[in-house]
Amino acid sequence: MNFDLTEEQKMIKELARKFADEEVAPGARENDLYARFPMDLPKKMAALGLLGGPIPEKYGGAGLDYICHAIITEEIGRACSSIRTFTSAQVSLVEISILKWGTEEQRLKYLPPLCKADIIGCFGLTEPNAGSDAGSLSTTAVFQKDAWVLNGTKTWISNGGIADIALVIARTGKEKHEGLTAFLVSKDAAGFSTKNIENKLGLRSSNTAELIFDNCKIPRDAILGGLGDGFKIAMSALDNGRFSVAAGCVGIGQACIDACIKYAKERIQFGKPIGNFQLVQDMIAKMVVDTEAARMLVYKAAYVKNKGLKSTLETSIAKYFASEMAMRAATDAVQIHGGYGYSNELPVERYFRDAKCATIYEGTSQIQKLIIGREVLGLKAFE
């Protein structure tokens, strides 16, 4: 077992950290305040290879391993969880899904422009009445003449309002799981529209939208994978999405540590820095241990992914622990900063708001525990 990063991984960490510090962090507060997604960042990220990490060079990616993917996602998440959410949707949910399930023609058509940020992607699974229970999706796709016709609504879709293509899971049959199929839908498709979701608690500068399909016609070859593969593709995508959420949460934990160390050394009370007080040190020590543990769980999941093995258990463990860790760390970070922590003058209140979403999307903490239980017991608590 080797805990040292390779030279390539060290280089990627330095590159991603520099980009996060110089390009992402400076605008994070205002972008959050005005719920504004910085449309210039994707191109800047793509120019450095940060939007195609695990995608082979043949398809326009950087050909990096999953440790590198985790490092990139952590560093972006350390600076801004909203930009990390964009990155997760673009890379983990859309690009990797097309890489795994797409035809060679689809890979060559979509992956290079996605990696270059010439186009933006989103993943359409959740519906108003179908969140944790993906088998209850009601968006339908019916084959008529020479085209598929989609009807229904997706909601809480990251990148939904700015995406050029949507990977959409729709019902093509009556079976709960086998009746689902994945489609690649262009924003220009007739009958496809979006509606932005505003006034979120956190991730305010991440675009979130509804996807609305009203007799939306798409070509017969728009299927990703095969007919009836939609549920498998969705679960595969979520394994990758949860991995990058977990890595992003490590970034939140590290950001909380960095902010608290700085503040605890500068803030004077009772004649000395508050970092001298045992209970402040206790909170910071817990952050450090929690964050390091979460990072190791993410790296273990990356190790399994690098071997090409099923990583559902490792990914769910990492996502569950890291998201809950981020919430604990952000809560204590606000406490350490006192009144200033309650103000957006300092970033810890944003970390707190952003961390909460990580315990909900890509599968709630409760769903992660049920997945972990299913994997270790071999018994299903839900279908």
Image (cartoon, grey):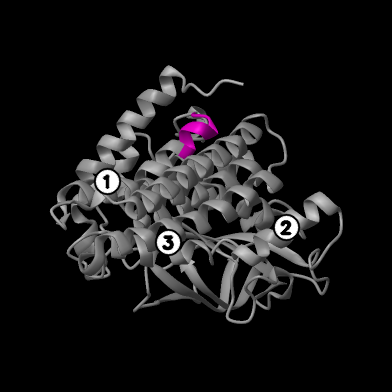
Question: Where does label 3 land, which residue?
Answer: 355
Whichever of callouts 2 and 3 sits on the residue coming sooner in the sequence is: 3
Identify the secondary structure beneath mark 2: helix
Residue 158 showing in the rendered view: no
Q: Quadrant of the N terminus?
A: top right
Residue at 72 percent of width and 41 percent of height = 310
Q: Are marks 2 and 3 in contact (CB under 8 Å)?
A: no
Which residue is tagged 2?
Answer: 371
The kind of residue tagged 3 is Ala
Discs 3/1, front: 1
**Considering depth in this image, is 85 or 5 the residue closer to the camera?**
5
Q: Residues within 10 Å of mark 3 (few under 14, many from 20)?
A: many
Instruction: Characterize the local packing of mark 1: few (<14), some (14-19) or many (20 or more) Cα atoms within 10 angstroms.
Output: some
Give coordinates of residue 39: x percent, y percent.
27, 56
What residue is at 48 percent from the left and 37 percent from the top? 69
User: Which span is picked out in magenta?
Assistant: 64-70
Residue 316, how many percent across, how many down? 64, 52
Instruction: Give the mark nearest the N terminus, 2 or 1.
Output: 1
Q: Regarding mark 3 in the picture, which secondary structure is present there? A: helix
Residue 50 highlighted magenta (yes or no): no
Q: 219 or 40, which is in the foreground?
A: 40
Q: Which mark is residue 261?
A: 1
What's the residue type where badge 2 is placed? Ile
Q: Quadrant of residue 348?
A: bottom left
Mark 2 and mark 3: Cα distance apart in space = 21 Å
